[in-house]
Image (cartoon, grey):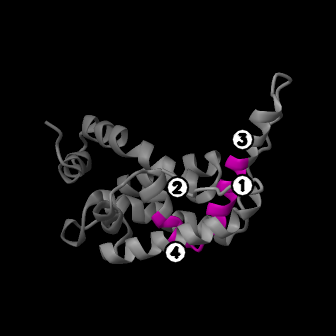
Amino acid sequence: MNRPDEELYRLMKKGDSSAFAELYDRREGGLFRYALHMTGSAAAAEEIAHDVFLQLMSATCRFDEGRGSLEGWMFGVARNLVRALRRKGPVEEPVDQACEHDILGELIDGEKVRALRGAIQELPEPYRDAVVLCDIEERNYDEAARLMGCPVGTVRSRLHRARALLAGKLKRLRPAGRTLQVVVG
């Protein structure tokens, strides 16, 4: 049976390294993916996920069980780290060099993925949060609302608006006479 995150946190604070390892294994991947989709940079995402755990382990950690779940707190820290990073300017990711075996179809597909990632990056943050959590991370509305700290109805309306904005941004990818359905997850 899985122990709740909050129990692992309490044990971790008492020096139980196995509790920390279990919590890290459980939450690091989701934090990394969230930060990756929010920043578009694997290096930045790795640093953000790492920094969330550093804050969690620090003596000045401000997590309060009475105010919400540990997972929600961790995603809130990640969200704040993403905001701080974005205030510094655009996040640069090294450009991948195309391999000789690449064919035109792979290049076109890659261009579509880059365009979609770019369009997601251009969304206002509340809309980007909704798309990343619901469409990419495949969280349900209740989970997304808990992690975003807002009502379920707000998540639904942000997601609806975000999808409309993405559809508008991605019009140029539509082949003549065809429509491009914007469903990320």
Identify which amino acid the numbered label 4 is placed on: Arg
Q: Secondary structure at mark 1?
A: helix
User: Which residue sits at x=46%, y=55%?
Assistant: 135
In this view, the residue in front, 14 or 181, is 181
Identify which amino acid the numbered label 2 is placed on: Val
Cα separation between marks 2 and 3: 16 Å
Cα separation between marks 3 and 4: 25 Å
> Are discs 1 and 3 less than 8 Å apart at CB?
no
Sequence-wise first label, 2 or 4: 4
Cα separation between marks 4 and 1: 18 Å
The percent coordinates of residue 72 (x first, y second) are 33, 62
Sequence-wise first label, 4 or 1: 1
The percent coordinates of residue 58 (x first, y second) are 38, 56
User: Which residue sits at x=20%, y=46%?
Assistant: 11
Q: Which residue is mark 4?
A: 161
Cα separation between marks 1 and 2: 14 Å
Left or right of 26: which side holds 133?
A: right
Rate crowding at label 4 as few (under 14), some (14 to 19) or many (20 or more) other CA atoms within 10 Å: some
Q: Secondary structure at mark 2?
A: loop
Sequence-wise first label, 2 or 3: 3
Residue 69 appears in view? yes
Q: Kindly report which numbered mark, 1 or 3, lies closer to the viewer in this rendering.
A: 3
> Are discs 3 and 4 less than 8 Å apart at CB?
no
Q: Kindly report which numbered mark, 1 or 2, lies closer to the viewer in this rendering.
A: 2
Sequence-wise first label, 1 or 2: 1
In this view, the residue in front, 70 or 122, is 122
